[in-house]
Amino acid sequence: MRQLNWQQKGIQVPDNWQWVKRLDFYIIKKCLGTYVFAIALIISIAVVFDFNEKMDKFMSHEAPWKAIVFDYYLNFVPYFANLFSPLFVFISVIFFTSKLAENSEIIAMFSTGMSFKRMLRPYMVSAAIIAVVTFCLGSYVIPKGSVTRINFEDKYYKQRKSNTARNIQLEVDSGVIAYIERFEDYSKTGYRFSLDKFKDKQLVSHLTARSITYDTASVHKWTIKDYMIREMDGMKENIVKGDRIDSILFMEPADFLIMKNQQEMMTSPELSEYISRQRQRGFANIKEFELEYHKRIAMSFASFILTLIGVSLSSKKTKGGMGLHLGIGLALSFSYILFQTIASTFAVNGNVPPVVAVWIPNILYAFIAFYLYQKAPK
């Protein structure tokens, strides 16, 4: 197809009409290529060390090779690649930009009149691509694979699912509060069960039972044994006793038997629905689920902050060369992961709201990025 000559048509084309130029494509290609190479290199090392550590357990539990490769490691690779994506972004940006600075290519760009802000454009495009891919993988794709991976670990490596739960209290319906002192998963039975019904904040019914068993063949069906029901109507009280009664209660063992890292097995819409439902029921142990939900958004946004830090640090040619830039970059990236871990611990064990905890590292490093951007060569 013949290319149109807009000037011959009498149309004035602005200089920046072509938003992404050949140099931008070159930088984007190199950034993304270095990012993928860094992931492939580090994850291959991680797979070797992980297999070396878990090989004895796999062999002792007679895990089939097909399950090890396809159920575990096929889902292990994208999970850890996505988990450490900010680190890979940082390393790839510093490595590539330092190489440009060492070859005096950045000086050549500036000598043509290009500003530092303009040079950041292809880097930010690369960061946007990585952020979108990271978010989509972490929110929708990887949780599906984590179901297979965690179930494999539960069967062949280390059991993660709790077999018992104690002091369970949750709202099963509007104004209906259930309490189970101890629940055992192998028999699907809870002991010392009570069910209180309130109307206008007044107790109208109080049921106590020796045990309650979940019917796995039905949905939300429970069998209550050795029960006593006290119904209050003003000053009157009616007592009903029985050996067995079947009842529909809107709860199931999965609501209080939480598997370790269960939040990683849910997509973001599932996490949002689960958090909302458990909060309405008064279930307190949902901070790890809230952390996972907000972390997926915060880690995607971190790509922009760490890219800005990386470019600002490594765009200047120094005597230390690439080694100095990589050293500073690794120190900053590992400190970012450390701050993220500490903030998450404060959220789980303290009173820090999860949404605040996961954004603390981003806010802190955004200030660092702004400072380095101001100091970068213009």
Image (tube, rainbow, N blue to C red):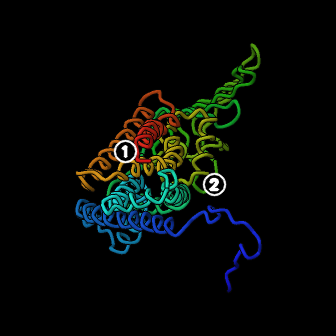
Circle 1 crowding by C-alpha within 10 Å: few under 14, some 14–19, many from 20: some
- Where is residue 81, by image quadrant? bottom left
Counting from the top left corner in percent of width and height, residue 329 is at: 32, 49
Counting from the top left corner in percent of width and height, residue 132 is at: 55, 58
Q: Residue furthest top?
A: 235
The reply, left or right, for residue 341 in relation to residue 50 is right
Q: Which secondary structure, mark 1?
A: helix
In this rendered view, identify the residue nearer to me: 361 or 343: 361
Q: Which secondary structure, mark 2?
A: loop
The reply, left or right, for residue 252 in relation to residue 325 is right
Instruction: Tell me whether the residue at label 2 lies in contact with that at label 1, contact meaning CB atoms closer than 8 angstroms.
Output: no
Counting from the top left corner in percent of width and height, residue 26 is at: 46, 68
Q: Name the residue under label 2.
A: 218
Marks 2 and 1 sit apart, C-alpha to C-alpha, by 45 Å
Counting from the top left corner in percent of width and height, residue 71 is at: 41, 68
Q: Which amino acid does label 2 sit on?
A: Ser
Q: What residue type is labelled 1?
A: Ile
Write the residue at 29% across / 51% down.
325
The reply, left or right, for residue 141 in relation to residue 57 is right
Q: Which residue lies furthest to the bottom in this view?
A: 1
| Residue 322 in sight in this render | yes
Q: Mark 2 or mark 1: which comes first in sequence?
A: 2
Residue 337's label in the rendered image is 1
**Which mark's residue is nearer the viewer, 2 or 1?**
1
In this rendered view, identify the residue nearer to me: 280 or 41: 41
In this rendered view, identify the residue nearer to me: 125 or 136: 125
- Where is residue 371, by image quadrant? top left
Residue 100's label in the rendered image is none
